[in-house]
Amino acid sequence: MAVLMEAILYIACSMSMGILVLSVVNVNSIPLLKIPSYLFSLSLVMIMITAYYPVIDLASRLSTDTSFLLKLLNITMHYQIGKSWLVTALLVIFMMIFTKVKKDSKRSSIIKIIALIAVLISIGAASHSSTITKWSGMFGHSVHLISVTIWAGTLIIVSWFSVNKHNWILFLTWYTPLARTCFFIVMAAGLYLMSLTVSYQDYPDSWILPYGQSLLIKHVMLVPLLYFIFINSRWVKKRLIYNPTFDPRRLARVETIFILFIFIVTGTLGQNSPPHNIKETWNGEGYSVLFQLFFQVEEFYSIGLTFTTQGILFLLLTGCFTTLIFAELKREGRAGIALVCGIFTFICLYLGIMESVTLH
C-alpha cells in the first residue's frame, strides 16, 4: 500500500505540474489538448491524501500503548513529517480555492506553479534525506522532485490528453531543451541523494539488501528510458519532417510508461532501510528476496563483478533487444513492439548484471 501511495503521489504531482506548465505556454506551441476540467483538482486532492499516508503509517506503528487517533494528532502537530503535511494541505486548499475564484490566465497559473513548488519543497522537508542532512537533504530532494514533475508531468499531459499531433515539432522545440535540463538536474540530485544513503564504493555490496536491489532496478530501468528520451526528442522530430502523417503520441506514451515504472520502484525505496552500514542493515533484514533468487547463502558476503557465460549471454540479449527497438522504429514505428523490446532490454540487462555477480 505504501509503495502504491508514493507512486500515486509522484503521478499526481507530475500531472498537476504538467497542467500548469502547459497553461503558461503559447497555445500555438503545443498540440490541441482536451484535459478533463476535474483533473487538476483531483490531482491536488490525491497529493493531499497520499502525502498524509506516511503520517498514518507512522502513527499505526507507534500507537501500541496509546490511542491511534491521539498518536495521529500528536504526529501531525509535533513531528516534522506532520508539520510538512500541514503546509502541503494548506497550500493545496489555497490552490483549489484560487482555481475556483480566479479565471484561468497565465498570471494565475504562475501563482499556482509557485504554490505547487512550495508543496514539493514541503514534501522534500519530510523526506528521509532531510533527516540525514536537514537543509542540503531537503534541497536535494525538493530539486529532484521539482525537476521530475516538470519533465514528466508535461510529457504525461501532452501524450495522453492531446487531441491530435498538430504543432508537435513546435512543442519539441521548447520542450526538448527543458526536458534535457530537468533530466540532468534529476541525475545530479539523484546521485547526491544516493550518496546520503549508500557510498558509491559500497553500491554493489548494497545489492544484497532490499534497498540496494530497488536502487539497482531503478538505475537499470533508466537505460530503456534513455532510449525513448532520445527517440522522442530527436528521432521523432526527424520522422515528422520526412513523414508528416506519423503520429508521435504513442511513442511519447511509452516513455511515460517507463517513468511510471520508475515511480513505482522509487516508492519501494522509501519502504526499505537505507544501508548506511551494509553489514548492520544485513544483520537486521537479511538478504533481499530478489538476491536470494540468484544466491542461496546465509553468511554475509561482499559483491564483486566478473564476466560469466550467463552474464555475457544476457548482455548480448540486451544489445539484441536494443537493436530491435531502433529497427522497429526505422521500419514501421509501432510503439507497442518498442515497449515490449524496452521491457526485455531492462530484464536482460538486470539479469546480465546479477549473473555477473561474484561473492567473496
Image (tube, rainbow, N blue to C red):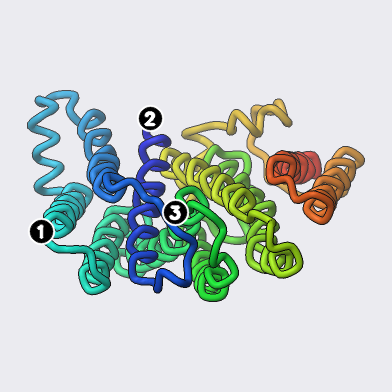
Tag nearer the camera, 2 or 1: 1
| Residue 102 drawn at (x, y percent) | 13, 63
Q: Which residue is labeled 1 in the image?
A: 101
Specify the farthest residue to the front: 245
Mark 2 vs mark 1, CA separation in Å:
35 Å
Residue at image x 59%, y 69%?
Answer: 169
- Three-letter residue code for mark 3: Ile
Callout 3–callout 2 Cβ contact below 8 Å:
no
Secondary structure category for the residue under label 2: loop
Sequence-wise first label, 2 or 1:
2
Mark 3 vs mark 2, CA separation in Å:
25 Å
Residue at image x 67%, y 40%?
Answer: 301
- Quadrant of residue 241 in the image? bottom right
Residue at image x 63%, y 31%?
Answer: 290
Dot 1: within a 10 Å radius of its alpha carbon, few (fewer than 14), some, or many (20 or more) residues? few
Tag nearer the camera, 3 or 2: 3
Q: Which residue is labeled 3 in the image?
A: 157
Number of numbered tags placed on the structure image = 3
Residue 93 seen in the figure: yes
Please state which of residues 245 and 15 is positioned toward the viewer in this rendering: 245
- Three-letter residue code for mark 2: Met
Please state which of residues 37 and 63 is positioned toward the viewer in this rendering: 37
Sequence-wise first label, 3 or 1:
1
What numbered label is drawn on residue 1?
A: 2
Sequence-wise first label, 3 or 2:
2
